[in-house]
Amino acid sequence: MFKSISKTLLTGFITVLPIVLTVYLLYWLAVSSERVMGGALKLVLPHDMYFPGLGMLAGLLLIFAVGLMMKAYIVRQLFGLWEKLLYSLPLVKTVYRAIRDFLDFFSPKDTPLGQVVAVTYNGAEVIGFITQTDEQKLPESFRGQDKVLVYIPMSYMIGGFTLFIDKQHVRPLKMSMDEAMRFALTAGITGKSSD
């Protein structure tokens, strides 16, 4: 009886937790943007023009404006100078670079970086993501070997392996990055979604 109750509770917990965490993250983002941007707007706007939610709306517009500005060459150059400054600060550079590299991996690009692949190893195949195809960005000792860098995520963990693999052992897959990451991180238990 206790086994049945605990199994039912665990099923309910596993069902509810992703929903709760997603809603909480969205709530936290909305409240944080409202607090920061709303506070700034209250200082600038007349009291009767401000309404709840205006800070969140201003935050979204600001993020959209930054995205638009990053399309301009001069803004990208100025941002590059700012990043050089961050990369020169001892503790900041480690944290910032790790976050930046992780987010760059998932950002939309026209290049094959992040392409979902199957890597063959000892007769088995694992899902991975190509992280680097440009030889000039590899360490000098790895250049000229007709290989690619592939990130292999670990199931149910934050982490994985980055492997330098011969191109002949890599096969492209028809899966989106989100779909492949979800499949790999859940060890395939959820299956490949049809959406």
Image: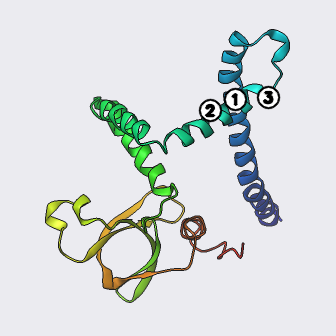
Residue 32 seen in this snapshot: yes
Q: Is residue 167 left or right of residue 106?
A: left
Amino acid at pointer 2: Leu
Task: Judge depth for marks 2 and 3 and give the one in front.
Answer: 2
Q: Quadrant of residue 148?
A: bottom left
Residue 31 seen in this snapshot: no
- For the point 33% across and 39% down, which residue is it? 94
Asked whether the residues under the numbered discs 1 and 2 touch, taking CB atoms below 8 Å apart as contact, a structural biologist would say yes
Amino acid at pointer 3: Gly
Task: Judge depth for marks 3 and 1 and give the one in front.
Answer: 1
- Earlier in the chain: of badge 3 and badge 1, it is 3
Relative height, residue 15 to residue 172 (above, below): above
Q: Position of residue 129 (x, y in %)?
A: 44, 68
Relative height, residue 35 to residue 94 (above, below): above
Question: In whole angstroms, how far apart are the C-alphas of marks 3 and 1?
Answer: 9 Å
Check disc 3 and report the residue beneath it.
Answer: 53
Between 125 and 173, the residue placed more toward the observer is: 173
Q: Is residue 148 left or right of residue 13?
A: left
Amino acid at pointer 1: Ala
Check disc 2 and report the residue beneath it.
Answer: 62
Residue 58, numbered label: 1
Q: Which quarter of the rendered picture does the N terminus lie within? A: bottom right
- For the point 66% across and 16% down, which residue is it? 40
The total of numbered circles placed on residues is: 3
Q: Position of residue 144 (x, y in %)?
A: 17, 73
Q: Is residue 116 left or right of residue 81?
A: right
Between 75 and 10, the residue placed more toward the observer is: 75
At mark 3, the secondary structure is loop
At mark 1, the secondary structure is helix
Determine crowd level at label 1: few under 14, some 14-19, many 20+ residues with C-alpha closer than 10 A. some
